[in-house]
């Protein structure tokens, strides 16, 4: 069977799943529209301010809209966050104090958090440098949360629990909203004062609720991932309990300024519009993920999640097994990207990552993973992570080239 026939078979087999995703998109879009209507969003909210960013009506309204969509008391949506990692870092430094302990409950965190925590690097002001202790609960051999260990893991010093929703660069299942709810319940039973913080990157609009709706105290993420709808040029967000959101923004700006600062530089229209588009764009990415999983599973490669499994984020992992296949896969995706199709992805260091990465990122927004991209660290077992996608048909076209380059396992 050739690559075109493989894709046709996949599209037919996945048709019922695609229909279910469309139903979810409609439900999430309704939630977005309700928030827009409640806060009477109008063209006057598109105007931005400069300088200090005081009295930015559009930004203030966007925070309220975003908070409602996330099921949170408050939110801060800011283009001054340079990445999801930056937003997460501000949240951690906003909550934690010297002598506190942070516990990661889903195994090792994403690579870019290692230097924030102090697991790698020295002298750059990590949490470790400020006297904040760190523990992590390892996953079970099957790659799931160790619920038994979690049930007794929280102490009086555990100020914050880090819940990484997405798999990151790990071969594990990403967390569902039900998983997060179960984690929060277990933590709060042991210590009601422990803050449950969710790294929400890649997970927004995957289900019909977000972590604050099931008890998470604070979440953070990037706007060049799901909630930016593929058109927001940069930034990040924090949402959750009002006092915790303010504490995090005090780390972004300064104590006493907090959420009152941060000019929007005429980006408000894009921020609102991206949020409106986000459910649809996430739905397209989910369809693309199913397509990748189905095709490469048929070719004999291990995939995570499995082809017909419910999505928990916009990431699809494929275990290619060799550096040559990892590089060839990324080259094929780059070749069928709208931007920089003539470029040749090669492994290279990237700030914040321990291993060299090879990355296909022919996106309109630099580094955007809400647009279709593929990357992976150059280390065993040589996993490629496909992310995002503005429309699943683009994923299908790029996959056809990848199949020809890689071949069966």
Image (spheres, grey):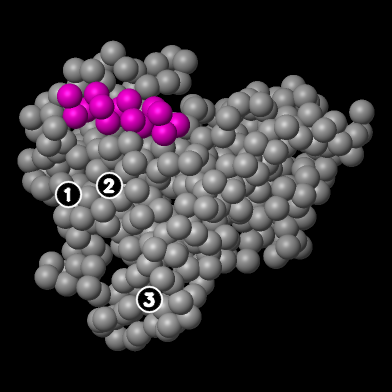
Q: Is residue 236 visible?
A: no
Helix, strand or loop at mark 2: strand
At a point 11% along the width and 40% down the height, the residue shown is: 100
Viewport quadrant of the C terminus: top right
Q: At which x and y percent is residue 240?
A: 27, 50
The residue carrying pointer 1 sits among few (fewer than 14), some (14 to 19) or many (20 or more) residues within 10 Å by Cα, namely many
The residue carrying pointer 2 sits among few (fewer than 14), some (14 to 19) or many (20 or more) residues within 10 Å by Cα, namely many
Nearer-N-terminus badge (1/2): 1
Residue 95 image label: 1
Q: Which residue is the site of mark 2?
A: 218
Residue 61 image label: none
Q: Which is more toward the observer, 150 or 122?
A: 150
Viewport quadrant of the N terminus: top right
**Is residue 98 placed above or below 182 in the rendered structure?**
below
At a point 69% along the width and 46% down the height, the residue shown is: 330
Residue 58 image label: 3
């Amino acid at each position: 069977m050739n690559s075109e026939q493989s894709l046709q078979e996949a599209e037919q087999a996945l048709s019922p799943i695609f229909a279910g995703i469309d139903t979810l998109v409609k439900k999430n879009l309704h939630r977005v529209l309700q928030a827009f209507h409640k806060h009477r969003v109008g063209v006057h909210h598109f105007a931005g301010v400069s300088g200090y960013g005081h009295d930015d009506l559009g930004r203030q309204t966007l925070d309220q809209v975003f908070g409602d969509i996330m099921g949170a008391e408050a939110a801060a949506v800011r283009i001054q966050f340079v990445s999801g990692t930056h937003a997460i870092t501000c949240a951690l430094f906003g909550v934690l104090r010297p002598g506190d302990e942070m516990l990661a409950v889903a195994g090792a965190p994403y690579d870019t958090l290692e230097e924030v925590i102090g697991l790698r690097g020295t002298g750059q002001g990590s949490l470790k440098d400020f006297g904040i202790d760190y523990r992590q609960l390892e996953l079970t051999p099957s790659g799931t949360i160790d619920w038994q260990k979690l049930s007794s893991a929280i102490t009086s010093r555990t100020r914050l629990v880090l819940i990484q929703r997405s798999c990151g660069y790990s071969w594990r299942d990403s967390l569902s909203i039900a998983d997060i709810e179960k984690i929060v319940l277990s933590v709060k039973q042991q210590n009601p004062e422990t803050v449950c913080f969710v790294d929400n990157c890649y997970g927004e609009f995957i289900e019909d609720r977000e972590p604050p709706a099931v008890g998470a105290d604070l979440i953070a993420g990037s706007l060049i991932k799901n909630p930016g709808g593929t058109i927001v040029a940069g930034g990040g967000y924090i949402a959750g309990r009002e006092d915790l959101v303010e504490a995090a923004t005090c780390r972004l700006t300064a104590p006493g300024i907090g959420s009152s600062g941060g000019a929007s530089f005429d980006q408000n229209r894009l921020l609102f519009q991206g949020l409106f588009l986000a459910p649809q764009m996430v739905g397209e990415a989910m369809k693309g993920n199913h397509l990748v999983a189905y095709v490469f599973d048929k070719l004999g490669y291990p995939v995570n999640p499995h082809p017909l499994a419910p999505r928990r984020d916009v990431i699809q992992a494929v275990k290619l097994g060799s550096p040559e296949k990892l590089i060839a896969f990324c080259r094929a995706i780059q070749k069928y990207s709208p931007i920089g199709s003539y470029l040749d992805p090669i492994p290279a260091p990237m700030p914040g990552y321990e291993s060299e990465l090879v990355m296909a990122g022919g996106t309109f927004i630099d580094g955007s993973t809400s647009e279709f991209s593929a990357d992976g660290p150059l280390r065993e077992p040589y996993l490629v992570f496909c992310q995002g996608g503005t429309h699943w048909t683009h994923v299908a076209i790029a996959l056809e080239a990848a199949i020809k380059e890689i071949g069966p396992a």
